[in-house]
Amino acid sequence: MDDEHTAWYKEPCALCSAVDWGVSDEGRFYCRSCHTVIERTKEVVDSTFTPGSNRVSTIGRGPRNKRTEGGRQWMICEGFQFILRNQADALLRLGVGPSFKDEALCELWRLYLQKSRQAYTHNPVRTSRFKVRGPDSDSESAAESSVMSASETDGETNPPSTIGSTAESSSEWSQCSGSVDAVSYLSPRLRRSRGLMSMKKTLALIHLALTWSREPLTLSDLLRLVNEGHVPYVNAYEELPDEMKLEGKDALLFRVESVPSHQLVHKEAQSLVLLLQLPAFPPISRQTLLHPALLSLRYLTDANLPDELHPWVCRVMERAGMADQTLHTFDRLSHPVLPLYDVQAAALIIVTMKLIFGLDDHAEWDLSNQTGDLDDSGNLFNLRRWYRLLRAALTRAQQRRDHDVARKQWIAENPLSSSKRDKRVVVKRKRIAEQVQICFQKLSRGPAGGERGDPSSFRFCWGDEDGADGPSLHHKKLSGVLTLQHNVLTPSNSTYWHPALRACNPRTCRSHYSDVEATLPRTFVWLLQLFCFLLDVKPAFLYEEVLKVERRVINSTAARSPETKTGTRTRTRAQRRTPQRGQETG
Amino acid sequence: MEDLETETRCPEDLEDDNDSSDDNSTKRRKKSNLLLVKPMFVEKPMETGFQQTTRICLEQIREALLHHRWQEAAEYMAYYPQILENTSHSKAQQNKEVIWRISTEILHHHPNSKIEDYNNIYERMKHSGVKHYLMICLEHSFHLMLSGHIEDAKRQLSLAEGWRHGKESAAQYQRTKLIHAYRGLLDYIIWCDKKVTHCNTDLSDPRDSQELQNYFRQASVNLKEILKSPGVWDSFILSYVEMLEFYEDHEEALQILNDYAYDNTFPPNPNAHVFLYQYLKQHGTSDRKLMKVLKNLHVIVPSHEMMLDYSSFLLQSEKKSDLQKALGVVLEMLDFACWRSNLDAWKRLKAIIQKLQLQEDWKDVVSLKMAARKDWWPALHFTSFHASKDSEENPELMEVKASLTKILCPVTKIDRRHNIGNTYCPTIICTYLPNA
């Protein structure tokens, strides 16, 4: 019955030397005398095959070609893994502690792979066309273990063999992309699930790992390092190993044209944290550098504000109930919002300055006039002097930043192109651009690409050295703006203004800053812009955070108003702030 | 050439704009009712980092160019070409053109720019796209021509002539024509050089030189071709005529000059008539024919300097009508302010009037011609201000004018009370305007 399949095969059996072959149920040849199964399978004639309908119209040497060129087949998540590793290494070189990479980032990455069902799982998120083939999984798992960091995958004894898979019609994929699964990665079904990796997510993951390790690198610091090129992001794919060839649709995943904004990365991090279902983060106590108590000190220094302002900031923080560590620690159950350390610290400082200086375009200048009259030795902090200094420094810094932005080179040395047809065009354009560049470099006698200065946590440099932005005002005293009332130091300023409140739907309304901005005092707006420059966020965002902090301060004092014995200051404040909606001045 | 470049320059560079490059300002929601020019460098709401970089870079380049800070412009230009590698196709052509034009502008003014830089940039930008290949070829060869590299310029044009790119080259046929024309002009320039060297070195008749004749043939093919298309081809026609004169092909020269002057499809060009007139005069044509040419010129440009010649022809002719025409011609000349102080024109007028006065009806003739002018001619020529000026600068002119005043503007009122100081005519007072 199966003679027609085996009649032509005349090889003797290795065991019994008989020539008597049959075909088993699985389609393999077996020797009828000794029942050994050999590798040969019966040729199946697929009657449903119609030439031209299947994309594979040629017996391709496609995958073989890839092998002979030295490339190998790779998955998209492998690529991202390499990029993450490079980013983490860059951060380690900048001084972040190694536990960030080994304990936090690697674990998060593995957890992510598991939760998004790309690895470490029994049912990977893939289309059914992928089948497991024997020979390839060895190379894949070997590669897999080679890219893992030092710490072992203990407990995960089941290496992700599902990763090592080849498509049946692999030549089809290889025409579209260098990686094996780029096309499926980009499929609408998988994209809708929102679990898939993207370049933005690498930054979000790193931010989570940094927060987990309680490193004092905030999100704005991270983004600034990325912008300045100290952490690979734009053209990060260039550092992938040579065997991983990027072509075609890979470009859509790995090529970036912007560095994402603060808000965007924060949103990604938030959704990632929910996807990963992380347990409670290590607590951020007052001693941690991410806590507003200490982070605000850093921003005060950067903004050249006197150190004496710091205790006031802490006071406001306590009054707003923000000293508590639970507010700053992410917990899925009790506090499922990822805190914005940098923006909150800046908002606290702004609210403190509002309290002490008024910042309504009149009070602060009156105060500085008074200080000027009082001051003989020049030891008192004068807001006017500070403002002039900072305004000049800010303008210069903004110009420098524009200068750097204009010079930033976004195109890689070997640019990716989405299709083979475009590749020729891309190479040609690159040549032309390079030639024009060389011509003008020769003319201007300057190097191309922005020079990367040494990375620094601080945007400004205050002091007397060369290259400083101005003299330091950190040691100045606040006595000019404080008075002694009932033996307690109080700010001389007794006014506080607040923009009009309105009932909005928190879901749909983002920010009313653009409407309100024209009515706000100019000093306040300028102060917002200063901190926005330090943190590289949008003014509207910071403004909303300032409002939130104010709300906390107001609510907490209102709750305490029945206690009349506690300090006169509390009472006076509560009396002033009760109820009216609208602008209030003292 | 400069005008051609500024006219065809990208409109970006010429527009006045208000930069809203403040990163911190929010987008203005209200639309202004004033007629404001659309701002050029506006941050789009969904701008990528790459777009932001190129926008700011272009802003800086523009600022540097407008303030003539060429070194700074060159520095920024070293960072800008990455926009060429932008994958979007919508503005690819515009970007290439911007880079081409800005690069050449910077090279024009930068102190260290060399001809190699020009060549490099032109070559690169030429091959970056098909739509402007011919244009850049032309500009390149103009530049080489102006720097004296005639042979190189010609080589560039020859290369451009041989360029074919399907529909594109067919669509740009007008530029191709220009390329042929300039190639012809370059051949002529080379012919001139060779003629001079030949005359200096060789004793044989230059007309027999084969090399010269080759160049002449090459040039004439192209030049003749371009003269068939409507346009202003003054330089081309002059060079062609010069060569034809040298080889004594007078018929051909006359033919093309006539065509150039009288073809209605060509834009009206007074120079064409001038060329024809000069050629005919040189070759001894009858006065009647010359007058005919000048008559056409008179119609186009009544204030042309050739009108003096025309009026002298008319003066010398025997016909009575010609004399009246002469009067008309000179009066029309003097209608224009440029002839106001010209002694020759006034003398001519005086001669005509004198000859006219031999006829009986001269007063009628004069008043007929002056009918349309008597309201404003006194103010144009015969005020006391003119009198004082002429007496200082050109007394002879004053005499001539004075003698003509009462003839041209006969007085209807005599009012001695209006006799103010230095009037033009000491005895007659016309309706003068007061001193300006």
Image (spheres, coloured by chain):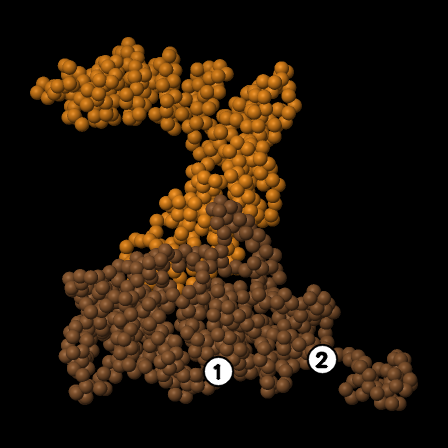
Chain colours: A brown, B orange
Residue ID for mark 2 = A134
Q: Chain of mark 1?
A: A
Query: Between residues A324 and A361, which one lies in front from this camera angle?
Result: A324
Type of amino acid at the residue the image marks with label 1:
Leu
Q: Secondary structure at mark 2?
A: helix
Direction left: furthest residue: B417
The quadrant where residue A523 appears: bottom left
Determine whether B88 is above or below B285 in the image: below
Residue A280, position in %: x, y?
44, 86
The answer, for residue A351, to whether it is visible in the render is no
Determine whether A379 is above or below A160 in the image: above
Q: Quadrant of the C terminus of chain A?
A: bottom left
How crowded is the residue under tag 2: few (<14 C-alpha within 10 Å), some, or many (20+)? few
The answer, for residue A472, to whether it is visible in the render is yes
Residue ID for mark 1 = A275
User: Residue at image x 58%, y 38%?
Assistant: B156
Residue B138, position in %: x, y?
53, 39
User: Residue at image x 37%, y 24%?
Assistant: B304
Query: Between residues B288 and A36, which one lies in front from this camera angle?
Result: A36
